[in-house]
Image (tube, rainbow, N blue to C red):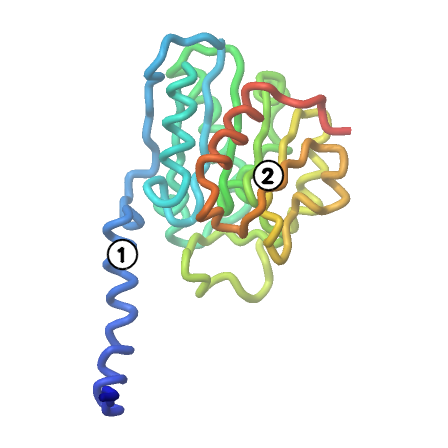
Amino acid sequence: MPIHFSGRKVFGWLSLAPLLVLVMMALGGYFDLKPRRWFDATAPRRHDLVAVYFSGDMGLDIGANARTIDAFRARGVPVLAINSSALFLHRRDRAYVDTLVADSIRDALTRSGANRIVLIGGSFGADILDTGAGVLPADLRARIASVVLIVPGTQVFFHANPLGFFYSGQPDSDPRRTVRLLHGLPVTCIYGTSESDSLCRDGELAHARRIAIADGHMMLAHYRELVSASVDAALSPPATLQ
């Protein structure tokens, strides 16, 4: 016997949808407002390295973020994790982004005592990293061992929102211009073959190491492959981007 729903009941369920989304986001850690977290290595340090990891717009506890951080730690690399959902809860400007990237590097180097640094960003975090890394002071730039951009976009906004409500209108930065400033650094760009658009496919990154994974932007079915590719790329960097 078919089940019929009245218009009122359907509307009632639909009205609960935003609340359910908020609950899922809260359970996943999206509303974690701690801007930075320090993670010591869980294995003996085999590299004179420290990593700075810029999360996607859903924070550090959702998606492959935590798994990637844990994989670095298991390879003997401590990690300073930057929580994009907290720091970009409100719209920022370019000066804020540049300062954030530089200060995060200084903080990680000081805490760890390492001489070299790995920079890695996922999705929104890759956009922020691409924007700020190219204008680093010379003393910090010289200490970069590798740069890994995971599913970077072709438009950059300085306001994190996982539902996409604020990703419209005029972008805050053009990554096709800022990525040119990464020339001279060892850059790896990881993207999903099913993504509708990706900075990794852009001509400006033609000479970067590009890694394609058979999935979409979220990489929902390939977390293990994504984590492995990200850490391997960071610890075994390519030639510098020309």
Q: Nearer the viewer, residue 216 or 49?
A: 216
Judge the density around disc 2: few (<14), some (14-19), many (≥20) Cα neighbours within 10 Å: many
Left or right: residue 240 compared with residue 120: right
Q: Residue at x 59, y 29 (%)?
A: 147
- Using the image, determine if residue 86 lies above or below residue 118: below
Q: Earlier in the sequence, mark 1 or mark 2?
A: 1
Q: Nearer the viewer, residue 71 or 51?
A: 71
Q: Nearer the viewer, residue 3 or 226?
A: 3
Residue 67 % position (x, y): 38, 33
- Using the image, determine if residue 104 lies above or below residue 65: above
Residue 10, label in figure:
none
Left or right: residue 137 compared with residue 102: right
Using the rendered view, name the quadrant where residue 2 is placed.
bottom left
Label 2 element class: strand
Q: Residue at x 59, y 58 (%)?
A: 171
The quadrant the N terminus occupies is bottom left
Reading the image, the residue beneath label 1 is 24
Using the rendered view, name the quadrant where residue 212 is placed.
top right
Q: Residue at x 54, y 31 (%)?
A: 229
Judge the density around disc 1: few (<14), some (14-19), many (≥20) Cα neighbours within 10 Å: few
Residue 168 % position (x, y): 54, 65
Is the residue under label 2 in contact with that under label 1 (CB below 8 Å)? Answer: no
Left or right: residue 171 compared with residue 45: right
Q: Amino acid at mark 1?
A: Met
Residue 17 % position (x, y): 28, 71
Q: Amino acid at mark 2?
A: Ile
